[in-house]
Amino acid sequence: MDSRIKRTAIAMAVATALALPGVALAQATDKEKALEARVAELEKLVQEMLADKKAAPAPAPAAAAPAPAPAPAPTVATANKGTLTVKGMVVASLYAQDANFAFGNGQNAEYVSSEYSTDKYTIGGDVRNTRLTLDWQGPNTDDLKFAGLLELDFFGGQNAGAFTDEQPVPRLRLAYADIVKGNTTYRIGQMWSPMFGNVPVSPTHVAFPLGYGAGGLVGWRYPGLFVYHNFSKTTKLTMAAMRGSWNDAAEAYGLGAGESGIPQFEVRLDFAAGPWNMYVVGHYDEKDCDFANDTAANFNECGTGYSSKSLDGSALEFGAKAAFGNFSLQGNVYQGTAIGHQFGNITQFGDITGWGGWLQGSYKFNPVWSGNLFFGMDDPDDDDVFDSGNSRLKSEQIAASVMYSKGPYVFGIEWLNSNVTTGSRDTEGDVTETDLDGNQISFSAWYKF
């Protein structure tokens, strides 16, 4: 019995041992099938993703990084912890003229003063437009900003002798200090009078712009107090009280009719409407004809033939400019009396009433090439001109230029024509007139820094 039980146990053990591999194999087969199904499912998912990627549009290229901003102008620290920026330009011109010009030949030619006796051109060169500007900023407080500016060029007269042409004399243009509080700037020093508004574009006539004192462009620089207030981005008010001026002072400062009279007062309003930027200016001054230290006491120091003790100067000016795509237009017109010191009435001093104006159109052919066409005129009253001992009755000026601008460089060719009518009146009142005509052709190059 025992042996039978042993044999049965052994048989069952053997059978169990033989059955275990089959069970393990069955289990392994189920896992493999599940794994294979999972792999197939993953392969299907990958295929669907690849198909979606092919159907989707290519992603847009990444936006190019913006060009770096230009480096700020180099500055220098000053003793009062502010900063100083040095700016300016070098301007050289080669020119040919067939007449003599005022206020001089070359870069400050404005209107013909006399014709040559022969049909010839003079050829010259000029660098007096070269300019240096020192611009101070700061230091500032919590509610005030401080600034100042000094500007020089080289039209300050002439040396004497054989080497004059190569030694231009420096000239102070601007010198002022600013106090800024909010939208208001208080300026003390020498600055352009508010009448000096729009300025014609020219490659050659920079310090002495086209039309200046001969074609409707008026205004000058004076020491004084200037107040600028911005009402908004499009409206600005300027008020100025400036030292008086006239042509009779023997000394550089004081003792003249202009300096002894009431200072010059000007008010200007700038405003915008659509594409137009416009301004209107009013001017008033009073010359004291019996000025301080005038021992002659003949009350006619305000001009030949003028016998009153004072001479009022007044003017009204309107200017505008606008851009229409590549085309731009600008100009101004004025009417004034006794404003020769502001370059009015063809820069003639006396009790003279007249008007003038100029207009310039400019077209930008492409980013570097542009063209400009200018016309200006000044027409004082003939009788006033003769009564004050002057002779220029009318001035007309035409100019055309082509300019190339690239970075700090500017090159330009310009033709300028001036026609001035002069006259005299005899004792019987008969007038004899003479027309003077002159041309200037110039090539100029700038480097701005």
Image (cartoon, rainbow, N blue to C red):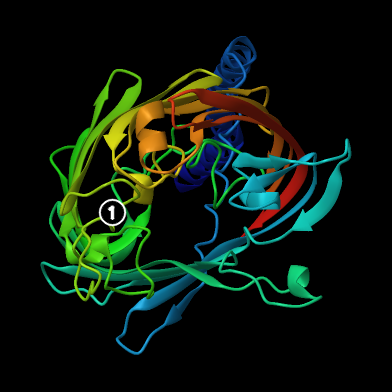
Side (left or right) of 168 relative to 338:
right
Residue depicted at x 53% and y 42%: 13
Residue depicted at x 42% and y 26%: 357
Query: In the rendering, at what x and y percent does residue 23 appear?
Result: 54, 30
Residue depicted at x 35% and y 62%: 248
Residue 259, placed above or below residue 34: below
Residue 29, placed above or below residue 297: above
Query: In the rendering, at what x and y percent does residue 292 appear?
Result: 19, 72
Q: Quadrant of the N terminus?
A: top left
Residue depicted at x 50% and y 62%: 72
Q: Would residue 243 be seen by someone viewing this image from the given angle?
A: no
Side (left or right) of 395 relative to 417:
left
Query: In the rendering, at what x and y percent does residue 46 appear?
Result: 59, 21
> For mark 1, what is the residue?
302
Name the residue nearer the viewer: 167 or 45. Answer: 167
Name the residue nearer the viewer: 443 or 95. Answer: 95
Q: Quadrant of residue 314?
A: top left
